[in-house]
Every structure is written in C-alpha cells, then in structure tokens.
Image (cartoon, grey):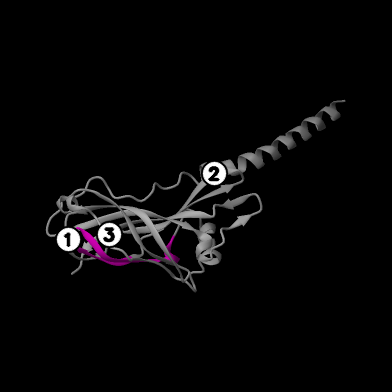
C-alpha cells in the first residue's frame, strides 16, 4: 500500500515537472534570460543650443545607431527582439529648411542583439551578409523641416526614399524627428518593413518560435558638419 502511494506521488510529481517545464521554461527564458527589450532609438530631449548656419553638408558621425525591432512568439511568450550596430555611415545636404539629399549605409555583419544564436541566424540564413553586407537608404524627395527648425524647434516630418536590403530596392515613407544639436543635427525614426518584400523569410520552428512577417528598422543619426 505504501509502495503504491509512493508511485502515485512520484508520477504526479513527474507530471507537474513536465507541465512546469513546458510552461515555465519559455516564461523563464522570456523574462529572465531574454529580459526587457531596449527602448526605441530616439533623439534626446536635452540638446545643446543650436549655433551657426543650418544650411550645408553633413556626415553621419559617431554615436549614430541603427538596427531592427521585430516581435516574436517563443513557446507562447511575447518578445520584442532588438539588434543594433553603430557601424553606420552616410551624408546629408540641407538648403534653407529642407534636406535636399541624404543617404545612409548600415554594415549588417556588425548588428548584434543580446543572443548569439539570434545573431547567427540574422547574419546567416536571414540577411546572408556574406553576399549582401549592407542595407542602404537614399532620400528621393526633399524633406521639409519647417521654418522654426532653423531657430531650434524640434521637427517631425515624413521622409520618402528608397530602402535597399539584400539587393532589393523598395520605396518607403516613414515619420522621423529631427532637432538641432549645437552645430549638428540629430535625427531618429523607424521604417516599417514587410520582410517578404525583400526576399526575407522570417524564421519559424514549429509552434515554438514564430517571428512576425513585419518589423521595424530603427535609427538614430548624429549629423555633424562636413569638414
């Protein structure tokens, strides 16, 4: 009788352990190992007062960042996956209160998240950085920052241009925010992306891992006056 009671308790404990592992494992990974996703990239609220003329040529300088943000489901747990790099280059031209030209290049091999396995997937199967090492954006329409921007007002406007990923170029329009910072300009925003438009298949592992078919390319650009 005692032996039968022991085995009942053993089997009940084993069932509970399996259930806890199935439910609690992904929860532990999502909340403890994965942790909270980094906040979206955005221009700071405490800028140095604007000085000098606004018009002229600018280059993307140190402190600039770009990367991705995508939602995924891991074992039923909702996670925002974020990867970023500071290996960003580019230029912009301002005439009056308008940005008349602009381009940005991101080196994809340097994009890192908080998980090595995710980074391996990103640089390998997803982006294939050996063949397609960069993602680029080129402004195609003048971007009007408004008359008040010259005097230091924060500007919010829609940027229109061409985004190239994996040698596929698509037109994009997205909201961005700009503010003068001393003699430079800080710009931030996010570009909505449908992965299939660029020949990218979001990774999926049965019902355990599912990545949304859309995501965001985030950026924070520190534009310094060209020498």
Horizontal relation, residue 70 to residue 42: left or right? right
Residue matched to label 2: 78
Residue at position x 88%, y 25% from top?
Answer: 1
Horizontal relation, residue 132 to residue 180: left or right? right
The number of callouts visible is: 3
Residue at position x 38%, y 54% from top?
Answer: 190
Q: Position of residue 74 (x, y in %)?
A: 58, 47
Instruction: Kindly indicate whether the residue at mark 2 contacts the one at mark 1 (C-beta within 8 angstroms).
Output: no
Q: Earlier in the sequence, mark 1 or mark 2?
A: 2
Residue at position x 14%, y 51% from top?
Answer: 151
- Viewer-nearest residue: 215 or 14: 215
Q: Earlier in the sequence, mark 2 or mark 3?
A: 2
Range shown magenta: 89-111
The numbered mark at residue 96 is 1
Q: Nearer the viewer, mark 2 or mark 3?
A: 3
Q: CA distance from mark 3 to mark 1?
A: 11 Å
Q: CA distance from mark 2 to mark 3?
A: 36 Å
Q: CA distance from mark 1 to mark 2?
A: 45 Å
Taking the view exactly as shown, the residue that stands out farthest to the right is: 1
Q: Position of residue 171 (x, y in %)?
A: 41, 63
Taking the view exactly as shown, the residue that stands out farthest to the front is: 141
Q: Earlier in the sequence, mark 3 or mark 1?
A: 1
Q: Position of residue 63 (x, y in %)?
A: 29, 58
Instruction: Kindly indicate whether the residue at mark 1 contacts the one at mark 3 (C-beta within 8 angstroms).
Output: no
Please tell me whether residue 180 is drawn above or below residue 93 in the rendered image. above
- Viewer-nearest residue: 38 or 9: 38
The numbered mark at residue 143 is 3
Horizontal relation, residue 35 to residue 189: left or right? right
- Viewer-nearest residue: 205 or 217: 217
Q: Nearer the viewer, mark 1 or mark 2?
A: 1
Disc 2 crowd rating (10 Å Cα; few below 14, some 14-19, many 20+) is some
Disc 1 on helix, strand or loop?
Answer: loop
């Amino acid at each position: 009788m005692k032996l039968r009671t022991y085995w009942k308790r053993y089997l009940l404990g084993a069932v509970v352990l399996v259930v806890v592992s199935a439910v609690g494992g992904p929860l532990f990974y999502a909340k403890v190992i994965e942790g909270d996703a980094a906040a979206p990239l955005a221009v700071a609220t405490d800028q140095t007062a604007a000085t000098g003329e606004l018009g002229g040529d600018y280059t993307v300088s140190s402190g600039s960042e770009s990367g991705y943000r995508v939602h995924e489901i891991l074992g039923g747990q909702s996670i925002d996956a974020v990867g970023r790099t500071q290996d960003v280059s580019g230029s912009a031209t301002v005439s009056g209160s308008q940005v008349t030209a602009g381009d940005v290049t991101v080196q994809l091999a340097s994009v890192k998240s908080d998980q090595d396995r995710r980074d391996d997937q990103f640089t390998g199967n997803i982006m294939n950085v050996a063949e397609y090492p960069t993602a680029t954006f080129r402004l195609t329409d003048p971007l009007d920052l408004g008359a008040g921007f010259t005097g230091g007002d924060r500007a919010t406007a829609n940027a229109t241009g061409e985004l190239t990923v994996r040698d596929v170029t698509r037109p994009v329009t997205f909201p961005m925010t700009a503010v003068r910072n001393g003699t430079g300009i800080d710009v931030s925003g996010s570009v909505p992306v449908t992965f299939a438009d660029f020949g990218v298949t979001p990774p999926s592992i049965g019902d355990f891992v599912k990545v949304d078919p859309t995501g965001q390319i985030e950026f924070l650009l520190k534009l310094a006056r060209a020498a």
